[in-house]
Amino acid sequence: MKIELLGTSFTIQTDEDPAYLERVVDYYRKKVFEIQSGVRNADALKVAILSGMLAVDELFKERNRQNLETDSPSVSEAEEITSRLLASLDRVLQDTESGDSD
């Protein structure tokens, strides 16, 4: 499957259903758009990293929600990891908005 994201084109081969993979790519594109809409002049690498972190944050929150429903002991660990990721994301966004470049 050929994928075009953030000005880069590449082809991936997978055993996954093409329709499923297209949904995954479309979801990631939405995350990229969210970041690009909120951060001015960010380079493609920063946008990709922040988009990935946003998607992982959602994953962790969902896992946390599921763990809460099952009273799993790993809930506090998921909350801690999510909090650290959000703090990192906030720092990067603030640096980007203030015009700092890494």
Image (spheres, grey):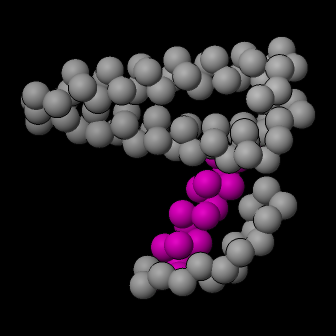
Give the vertical position of 64 relative to 29 (above or below): above
Q: In the rendered view, does 85 fall on the left or right side of 90? A: left
Q: Quadrant of the N terminus?
A: bottom right
Q: In the rendered view, does 34 fall on the left or right side of 98? A: left
Q: Position of residue 75 (x, y in %)?
A: 21, 27
Q: Quadrant of residue 76?
A: top left
Segment colored magenta: 17-33
Give the vertical position of 17 relative to 83 (above or below): below
Q: Main secondary structure of the magenta part?
A: helix
State the residue at coordinates (52%, 43%).
Answer: 55
Give the vertical position of 42 relative to 97 (above or below): below
Give the vertical position of 33 relative to 25 (above or below): above
State the residue at coordinates (57%, 45%).
Answer: 52
Q: In the rendered view, does 99 fall on the left or right side of 51? A: right
Q: Quadrant of the C terminus?
A: top right
Q: Quadrant of residue 79?
A: top left
Q: Pick whichever, 28 or 66, lies toward us.
A: 28
State the residue at coordinates (37%, 37%).
Answer: 60
Tell me if residue 37 is in the magenta stretch: no
Q: Position of residue 25 (x, y in %)?
A: 61, 64
Q: Position of residue 53 (x, y in %)?
A: 54, 38
Q: Quadrant of residue 12?
A: bottom right
Tell me if residue 22 is in the magenta stretch: yes
Q: In the rendered view, does 89 fall on the left or right side of 78? A: right
State the residue at coordinates (84%, 61%).
Answer: 7
